[in-house]
Amino acid sequence: MLGGNDNQAEQFTLADVDTMTSFAISNGLAGIHYWSYDRDTDCAVGSASSTCNSMGVGYVGDYGYLKRFLADGLH
C-alpha cells in the first residue's frame, strides 16, 4: 500500500518505487499494480488513511507515486 500502512513502521516510499520499477523492467514484467491508487495524495503523518498516503504534506503531491513509476520508465 502506498505510503504509511496499518503498522506505522511499514511504509512504501519513493525509494521503494525505484526498487520495484527496476526489478520489473529488468525482469520484463508487463506491469505493476499497487494498493491503493486513491491514496496517491499527501496528508499529515499519522495512521493509515483510505484517502491519502500519510507520509506528510509535501512528500509526493497529487499522484506523486504514479509520476515516479512513470519517470522510472514504466508506461
Image: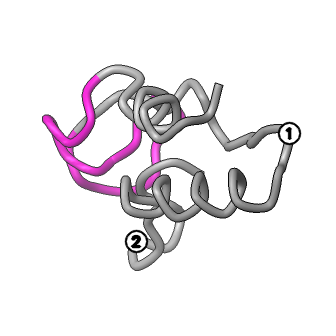
Which residue reaches farthest top?
62
Q: Residue at x 41, y 23 (%)?
A: 63
Classify mark 2: helix, strand or loop.
loop
Eye-nearest disc, 2 or 1: 1
Query: What numbered label is drawn on residue 54?
Result: none
* 72 relative position to 24: left or right: left
Q: Could you classify mark 2 by the number of other residues whose Cα lies within 10 Å: few (under 14), some (14-19), or many (20 or more)?
A: few
Q: Nearer the viewer, residue 37 or 7?
A: 37
Find disc 1 in the rendering and name its residue: 30
Query: Split into 4 quadrants, where in the image is the C terminus?
Result: top right
* 7 relative position to 14: left or right: right
Picture quadrant of residue 52 = top left
**Total marks placed:** 2
Q: Residue at x 85, y 39 (%)?
A: 30
In the image, is residue 7 part of the stretch drawn in magenta? no
Q: Could you classify mark 1 by the number of other residues whose Cα lies within 10 Å: few (under 14), some (14-19), or many (20 or more)?
A: few
34 lies above or below 3 = above
Classify mark 1: helix, strand or loop.
loop
Secondary structure mainly formed by the magenta segment: loop
The percent coordinates of residue 50 (x first, y second) are 54, 36
For the residues marked 2 and 1, what is the alpha-carbon distance in whole angstroms? Answer: 31 Å
Magenta residues span: 44-61
Picture quadrant of residue 47 = bottom left
Find disc 2 in the rendering and name its residue: 8
Q: Amino acid at mark 1?
A: Ala
**What's the coloring here?**
one colour
Q: Amino acid at mark 2?
A: Gln
Q: Residue at x 14, y 35 (%)?
A: 58
Q: Residue at x 74, y 42 (%)?
A: 32
7 lies above or below 21 = below
The first of marks 2 and 1 along the sequence is 2
